[in-house]
Image: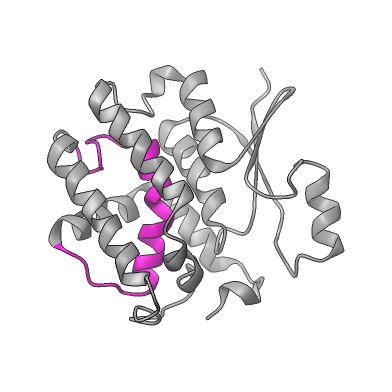
Amino acid sequence: MTKPMLVIGNKNYSSWSLRPWLAMRVAGIEFDEKLIEFGDFGQDWVDAITKFSPTKKVPLLIDGEIKVWESLAILEYIADKYPEKKLWPADNAARAMARSVAAEMHAGFTNLRNHMPMNIRASHPGVNLDKPGVMDDINRITAIWNECRSKYGAGGDFLFGQFSNADAMFAPIVSRLTTHAVPVDAVSRAYMDAVQALPAMIEWSDAGRSEKAIVAMDEI
């Protein structure tokens, strides 16, 4: 049986690629990986990504004749295809909450995204925390983490106890807050430590730190 292929960008920078990659790794879903470096987003990038993605963006999951793009859509697809992996919580209320916060993450927090791009190699303690809306985004994110852990976190160290797609969606935020050494409450710190301790997260981060390519827009 042919394994699905996940097309991703640079591990140092590509927050969107990290999400499905991490979920599939943690869940033990076998897949092939195709990394296309962002570079300068010139013609080489366009030529390379056009061979795979209809949107000319990453990530993209190719499963036989099926193509799935957008991180959240890929997470939904793998949850449907591999129900035994339990990538959404089994409880209806918890699952509704998990899907809601995952969608909020997918659509929102643009101030944090713009001023704190994912850059695993970098260390920017406190940089850009004073930019408009950044702390509002961070406060909302940590409030989500606290609510999920309080209501549904029993039985594990993640938002809904065991690792789920919701954790995959928030993993790049964990990386960003780590790069910027953002002070957070104890519950959020424990959650961030749990995400960073995942063997798959360590694998991704180590690979990101070893990359040499520079993407100017993600360097601050």
Left or right: residue 65 versus residue 206 is right
Task: Return the x and y of residue 30 as percentages of the image width and height.
Answer: 55, 30
Point out the stretch of residues depicted in magenta: 156-185
* Residue located at (76% from left, 65% from top): 41
| Residue 65 on the magenta segment | no
In the displayed structure, would residue 172 be above or below residue 68? Answer: below
Quadrant of residue 181 in the image? Answer: bottom left
* Residue located at (55% from left, 34% from top): 74
Inspect this view and state whether residue 65 appears.
yes
In the displayed structure, would residue 92 be above or below residue 94? Answer: above
Inspect this view and state whether residue 200 appears.
no
Task: Return the x and y of residue 68 as percentages of the image width and height.
Answer: 64, 32
Left or right: residue 191 versus residue 4 is left
Which residue is farthest front? Answer: 132
Task: Return the x and y of residue 161 as percentages of the image width and height.
Answer: 22, 36
In the displayed structure, would residue 126 be above or below residue 40? Answer: below
